[in-house]
């Protein structure tokens, strides 16, 4: 598995990493054995950066990860989790909850430190609190050795300059904003590199939009986006290619992105990602797909508080 350095940190991450949101049953009901096997397969294939959150299944993802990780040497994996979002509408970025959340996550996963901690989906709250209270609280915990690197995640592009023009962090994570249909995140890469911030991407399939699977009920992309992406998927299928393969390869091809995080509780999906990431991309097919998608390129949706978009 190819690896890239993350910003100014000493971490080298695989170009495809394992996202553990599905372990919290975000898409479907999963068995414990499926969940544990997916993690083991990811690690065996070199996808040894694992991204999770207490939001995923209200702690279920972290608990299940702990069943695998607590038996492994700590140097065998790189671990990131998040804080601040705990349920669909439950957010708490207070300094008190920062300390509690990190301790609970460490306990659930059976580890003594986190490599990366992210403030999760900050667009849903008054973001000045992240600058004034949340990140300073995490910095104190980092100084105590429980956390190595600090960052934040979210959907609207406005969040990046708002935070980074005021306070330094090590890494950022954007989801559903760098993939075949939407590359808005790339507009900020030069700015992020100037700030010496590591770049992580999540959602290469945009919540199944760029797969052959049925979309979840909560999918928010407009109908014209869904229709064009379905047309693109059908075109790939006519050429004997799963559009999900092209989606993985498109993200991996951008060497300004340290890692792209993909999530599944299906071990076969994880095996495919590793195989696809190592295979050459069909440039002709990519051009055809991008032409189909061009009329709806970069169309997204509103997420979080209106003033944060």
Image: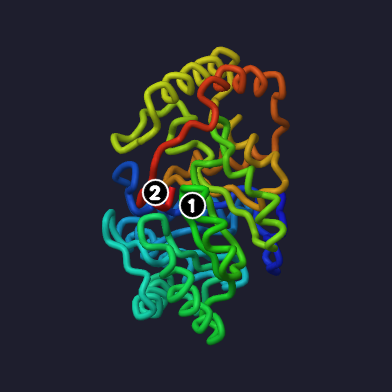
Q: Is residue 254 left or right of residue 109?
A: right
Please state the horizontal and vertical placement of residue 200, each as a whole percent of the image.
Answer: 59, 53
The residue singled out by tag 1 in the image is 19
The residue lying toward the viewer, choosing from 236 and 66, is 236
From the viewer's perspective, is residue 109 above or below residue 261? below
Question: Vertically, is 58 above or below 247?
Answer: below
SS at circle 1: strand
> Residue at horizontal 70%, vertical 57%?
193
Q: Position of residue 1 (x, y in %)?
A: 69, 49
Q: Rate crowding at label 1 as few (under 14), some (14 to 19) or many (20 or more) other CA atoms within 10 Å.
A: many
> Does residue 1 appear in this view?
no
Q: Specify the farthest residue to the front.
A: 307
Say which residue appears at 39% left-offset and 41% top-offset: 302
Count of marks, rendered view? 2
Residue 267 coordinates in the image, percent (x, y): 48, 44
SS of the residue under disc 2: helix
Confirm or deny contact between disc 1 and disc 2 (CB under 8 A): yes
Toward the bottom, the furthest residue is 144
Residue placed under numbered mark 2 in the picture: 22
Q: Residue at x 53, y 87 (%)?
A: 144
Can residue 191 be spotted in the picture? yes
Where on the picture, by quarter, is residue 134?
A: bottom left
Q: CA distance from mark 1 to mark 2?
A: 8 Å
Q: Of residues 264 and 7, which is closer to you in this image?
A: 7
Q: Residue 282 falls in which quadrant of the image?
A: top right
Task: Depth check: give the residue in front, 224 or 13.
Answer: 224
């Amino acid at each position: 598995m190819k690896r890239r350095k993350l910003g100014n940190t000493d971490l080298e991450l695989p170009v495809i990493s394992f996202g553990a949101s599905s372990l919290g049953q975000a898409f479907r009901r999963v068995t414990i054995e499926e969940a544990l096997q997916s993690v083991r397969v990811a690690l065996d294939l070199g996808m040894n950066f694992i991204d999770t959150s207490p939001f995923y299944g209200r702690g279920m993802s972290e608990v299940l990860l702990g069943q695998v990780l607590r038996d492994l040497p700590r140097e065998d994996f790189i671990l990131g989790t998040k804080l601040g979002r705990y349920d669909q509408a439950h957010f708490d970025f207070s300094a008190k909850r920062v300390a509690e959340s990190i301790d609970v996550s460490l306990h659930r996963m059976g580890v003594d430190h986190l490599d990366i901690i992210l403030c999760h989906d900050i667009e849903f709250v008054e973001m000045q609190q992240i600058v004034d209270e949340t990140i300073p609280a995490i910095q104190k915990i980092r100084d105590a050795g429980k956390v190595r690197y600090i960052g934040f995640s979210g959907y609207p592009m406005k969040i990046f300059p708002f935070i980074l023009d005021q306070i330094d962090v090590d890494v950022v994570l954007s989801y559903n904003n760098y993939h075949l249909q939407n590359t808005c995140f790339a507009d900020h890469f030069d700015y992020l590199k100037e700030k010496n911030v590591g770049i992580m991407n999540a959602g290469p399939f945009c919540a199944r939009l760029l797969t052959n699977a049925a979309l979840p009920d909560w999918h928010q992309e407009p109908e014209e986006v869904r229709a064009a992406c379905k047309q693109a998927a059908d075109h790939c299928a006519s050429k004997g290619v799963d559009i999900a393969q092209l989606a993985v390869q498109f993200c991996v091809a951008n060497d300004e992105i340290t890692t792209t995080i993909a999530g599944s509780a299906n071990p076969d999906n994880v095996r495919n990602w590793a195989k696809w990431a190592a295979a050459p991309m069909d440039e002709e097919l990519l051009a055809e797909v991008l032409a189909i998608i061009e009329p709806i390129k970069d169309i997204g949706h509103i997420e979080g508080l209106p003033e944060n978009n």
